[in-house]
Amino acid sequence: MRDVGALAAERLFYRRWRPTWLHTAGLNVGLAAVYLAAAKLGLSLAIVNPSATAVWPPTGIALAAVLVFGRRVWPGIALGAFVANATTAGSLVTSAGSPRGTRSRRWPGPGC
């Protein structure tokens, strides 16, 4: 007969870790801050227009975050894109549409 304590320890050891809402919220806030910093870095390289640049580092950060963490990081990416556009040269109305465009670019198809 196996020891009850050993069975409980084995069950705890093999339990799959699942993120809590607090972990996901912190991840999204951190990702939004990194996205915003990368956006400001990319916009500092703009020559002709202050809100258009050939280099956009947040794209790589967003892609890596989605590949590593999955769909749950999209709110952080959208928040970072919104703040980056709102603080650059856009109004709040045009900035509100920007995260939707950022999110929809990941699916190729007609109109993309």
Image (cartoon, rainbow, N blue to C red):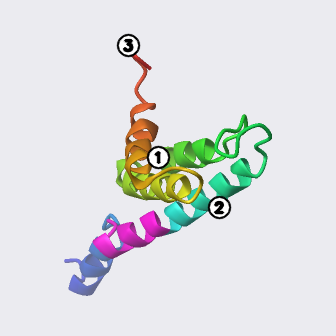
Neighbor class of circle 3 (other Cα within 10 Å; few <14, some 14-19, many 20+) is few
Q: Amino acid at mark 3?
A: Pro
Please state the horizontal and vertical placement of residue 111, each as a whole percent of the image: 40, 16
Please state the horizontal and vertical placement of residue 60, each as a whole percent of the image: 62, 43
Q: Going from the N terminus, do you reach mark 1 or mark 2 first?
A: 2
Q: Which quadrant is the N terminus positioned in?
A: bottom left
Q: Which one is closest to the eye, mark 1 or mark 2?
A: 2
Q: Going from the N terminus, do you reach mark 2 or mark 3 first?
A: 2
Q: Which residues are magenta?
A: 18-29
Q: Amino acid at mark 2?
A: Ala
Q: Residue at x 54, y 42 (%)?
A: 63
Which residue has dot 2 on it?
37
Q: Element type at marker 3?
A: loop
Mark 1 → mark 2, Cα distance in angstroms: 18 Å
Which residue has dot 3 on it?
110
Q: Going from the N terminus, do you reach mark 1 or mark 3 first?
A: 1
Q: Is residue 11 left or right of residue 41?
A: left
Which residue has dot 1 on it?
66
**Please, is residue 111 above or below residue 8 in the view?**
above
